[in-house]
Amino acid sequence: MSGLPKLLAIVIAMSLPTAVIVGKANAAAPTPVGGSRGLAVSVPADPVPIGAGTRATALVRIINASATPVPVTIESRRLLLLDNGKVTIGERPDARWQRRARFPSGQLTIPARGYRDIPLTMRVPPTLSPDLYFVGFLVTPVPTKSGTIQVINRIGSFVTIDVPGPRQRELGGKFRMPSLVFGSRANGTLHISNTGHAAVRFWGEHDTTSSPGGTPRQLRLDPSLLPAGRSRSTTVSGKPAWPVGIVRVTAHITYPGRTDAATKELVFSKRVLVISPWLPVGLALLLAAAGAGVWTRRRRPPRPVQISV
Amino acid sequence: MIAMKHPTRTKGVLAPLLAVTLITAAYLAFSVSGARAATPTNMSWTLSNNQIGATGVTYSYSFTTATTGTIKSITFAVSGAGLAGTPTISRNFGIGAGTVSRTGQTITYTVTSAASVPAGIPIYLSFGALTNSSTAASYTTAITTLTVASATIDTGTTPAVALAANNTAVTVAIAQSLTFTANSTAFELDMDPSLPALADQTATVGLTVQTNANSGYTLAVADGASGLQSGSAGNPTIPKASTGKATSVAWPGAPNWGYTVTGTGPTIDAAFSGSKYAGYTTGGETIATRANATGASTDTITITNRVAINYGVNAGVYSDTLTYTVTPNYS
């Protein structure tokens, strides 16, 4: 065997185990089929006003952020509105809106890095009482590549419509906050429930005053929606101006009354004694220093008494 | 001697007493006059549309009280003529609930339960459904806080606002939007029970979510009704790691099919803490939630899908469909 073929044989022999290892590593890795898929759905931020017995159209925008066109379907879906704003979307059409909200039938192809505006026409029956209603739908990409395990990223969404008119709005609430807190601030929980028959958009503020000292603080709450029968919880907190102080926390929750020309209010107030955890430590140190002073004074030899006659 | 000293001491006490009395009287006199007609501070007036004759306009007023007083009503007297519409209350901060009405150029906010408002409290009131005057001009609003007896507590005038036909009304409507991406639309696992590295494999699916929905979003997962099933004779399936997230377990070994979740941004369901695995359900289960908007940052959720087989699993091609559904929360 000449020198060159021998060297080649050695190189081939050395590379064989490497090839086997690489083969093993490739075999153990999952094989992706198709690239990424990015979709977005945009709906009007505010409720769309539609009078009872009339119809209106809202635009739903479907955006394809991927580099390839994506076929999608849009179908009516029943929504389940839960506490604290959570939404789950059902697998069946919403019986109330299935025929009253006209969704496009069949597949729509959203162009690569483009979008399509889908006009969603909704018809409100004359008998529907004034309230906020949620028209749910599901945007589902249609798989185009085969693979043993398909991945479908769907977006559920909804358009909110407002059937105008007087309505019965009623909120109730509970405010929980301890009367004594060892810490830097007092934290409480405000639990608001919609006990009426119509959805309520409420707003409010948390006012905090501290005694002694401290300027009143006002923390405003942006409007929040609360469907009938649902509740929301928020955290309320107040801080004393000094390491120890009495904090009065007042929470105001305001919402429209029967009409939007009047508001109703829930007011919760609580006085809390807040003691900083450093205060006992400081006092203990002070006492220790005072004790040490007394002890030192007692240990000092008594002054000689001078008696002058 | 004693009788001589006494008048001198009386004079010495009376002089400062007289001075204090005079100062107090002056202070009280000035403060009373201030209470009669103090001017609120930080007064502002903004309009959602400053085109003449525009309808459905929201007038927003803010000011800080100058005097402590029990406010029963607040009047907003707009200068000029032509104000129209039946106002609604869009917001009220710093002042209790109430009612709104308009007579001519004056919008009146009446507090339902009059309460004492200290000095220095910022008040904000926003009224919707108003119609601008059809006369192009500069307008101001005189804001007056009144007691139950209609006595003025504070009064002042806002800076001017111009209504014109040639103003450019800018309305920027930002839709409520949610973007959801998956880094893979499908994957394959080439498995072999003869070698542990090939008999137990994972495939991660990277999801990202971005939304401006104030209350965040909910992410749910589900799989097909048949699960991971083969089309060969008898339609065998690979069993699920658990019946759902409620019964999530440490990886149970072969033969099983399940997933675990990690993420940055949302709250991942506690069922997946400690790298526990769950089986997909057909009905779907919530695996991640977020209670506020993502802002400019992107939430990432990694779903690690795991399949383990042994010689007890029939050879064949097994398939399933994983559905990840994101829904914006209501706010």
Image: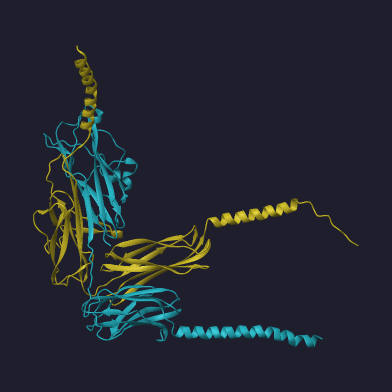
Chain colours: A yellow, B cyan
Quadrant of residue B117 in the image? bottom left
Quadrant of residue B146 in the image? bottom left
What is the quadrant of the N terminus of chain A in the image?
A: top left
Task: Answer above or below: position of A170 versus A85.
Answer: below
Q: Position of residue A164 (x, y in %)?
A: 21, 73
Quadrant of residue B110 in the image? bottom left
Outermost residue toward the top in this view: A1
What is the quadrant of the C terminus of chain A in the image?
A: bottom right
- Does residue A194 appear to the left or right of B237 in the view shown? right
Instruction: From the viewer's side, name the closer residue of A110 and A123.
Output: A110
Q: Identify which residue is drawn at 71% across, 86% down.
A: B10
Task: Answer above or below: position of B308 versus B90.
Answer: above
Q: Identify which residue is drawn at 53% across, 84% down.
A: B28
Outermost residue toward the front in this view: A3
* Residue B283 visible (yes or no): no
Q: Position of residue A161 (x, y in %)?
A: 20, 67
Q: Position of residue B4 (x, y in %)?
A: 79, 87
Instruction: State the count of labels.
Output: 0
- Does residue B71 appear to the left or right of B310 in the view shown? right
Q: Position of residue A51 (x, y in %)?
A: 17, 72
Outermost residue toward the left in this view: A106
* Residue B182 visible (yes or no): yes
Task: Answer above or below: position of B76 versus A226.
Answer: below
